Structure formats: C-alpha cells, structure tokens
Image: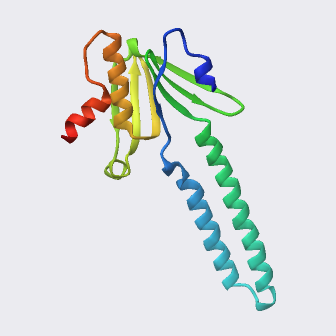
Amino acid sequence: MGFIERNLTTNESIVYRGKLHWLVFWKPIAITLAVILLTIVAGLFTYEDHHDLTLIIGGIVILAAIIICSVIVHFYRKNREYIVTTRRVIIKTGIIRRQLAELSLEKCEGMFIDQSFIQRMLNYGTIVITTGDVRNEFAYLSNPVTFRKHVNECIDKLKGRNTKTAEEADNNVIK
C-alpha cells in the first residue's frame, strides 16, 4: 500500500492514476547522444598511440552518463504520482523531500489542456487546474484528455449531476 492509499479519507477511492509520458527521458537520451558524439570526435583527433585509450575512456564515460541519467529519470518518474480520487486531485513528488499538492474537486474552477501538435500526436501534454488564485500544472502527463475526463466525471458526481463514465463516453464516440 502506497503513500496515497494510506492517506485517503473515509469513502474516498482512487478513480484514475495518471502517468508521466516516456518523453521525460529526452534529456538523458540527448546527453547520452552528445557524449557519444564527443567520444567519436575525440577518437578521430587523437594520435594513433592513444587511440585505444581514448576509446576505452570514452566508453566508460558513455556508460556512466547512461547509468546516471537513467537512474535519475527512473526515480523522477517512479516518485511522481498524479491521482484523481472521488474528492480531489493529488500530485505527489519527491524521494527525500516529499511535496504533496491536493486540489479539492469542489473548489476546482477551471481546467485546460496545453498541447502542441507534436504533443497531441504523441498523446501527452500539460493539464492546468485552477482553484481560486492557485494555478497547478501537471506537465508531461500521458493521456491528458482521459485525465481531464475522470476529473470532470468526479466533479459531476460530487455536484450530483448524472453523467456517463469516461469509458461509456469513449464507447459512444467509437460507435
């Protein structure tokens, strides 16, 4: 049982768990490619006497860059949760220093999705939820439209509106 599950209130349940998109790995991939390119360039401009040593050191640097970047992003992705419950939206971040933002669905005033053309093609984006003067952004969120549907569905249930579930709405659109 995770941190979120242990801290749910009475009669509150998790409706949807948002995930970070795999594109959060773009920085480690770019760093790794840059290190590989620099190693190749360094290998081309070294004397033949030191060519093998340059490639060995370059290989070690590449391996270290891949491991360090992958571990950092893995922990970043594992320790960031986007949760929609029947009463609130929760974002939890951090490994050592935990940050927790809770947005009451009753006080949710506005919500919009920020997506570029590429982000729509890759099915990720940023959801911005406003409650009063507070503006909360959920960046690199996979399936932001589904996340928004679940939030709206929970808001409607809290306000006593009779609406279709996100799955029923998806099935009607497909038919």
Foreground residue, 170 or 49?
170
Give residue 39's position: percent from left, percent from top.
67, 74
Residue extending farthest to the bottom is: 48
| Applied colour scheme | rainbow
Q: Name which quarter of the figure residue 134 lies in.
A: top left
At 43% from the left edge and 17% from the top edge, which residue is drawn? 86
Please, is residue 134 above or below residue 82 in the view? above
Tally the numbered discs.
0
Foreground residue, 172 or 157?
172
Q: Is residue 108 left or right of residue 140?
A: left
Q: Is residue 24 left or right of residue 46?
A: left
Q: Quadrant of the N terminus?
A: top right
Please, is residue 41 above or below residue 3 in the view? below
Q: Quadrant of the C terminus?
A: top left
Give residue 140's position: percent from left, percent from top.
46, 42
Give residue 94's position: percent from left, percent from top.
64, 33
Residue extending farthest to the left is: 175
Please, is residue 69 above or below residue 6 in the view? below
Q: Is residue 117 left or right of residue 143?
A: left
Q: Is residue 41 left or right of residue 110?
A: right
At 55% from the left edge and 32% from the top edge, which residue is drawn? 81
Q: Name which quarter of the figure residue 93 lies in.
A: top right
At 21% from the left edge and 41% from the top edge, which residue is drawn? 174
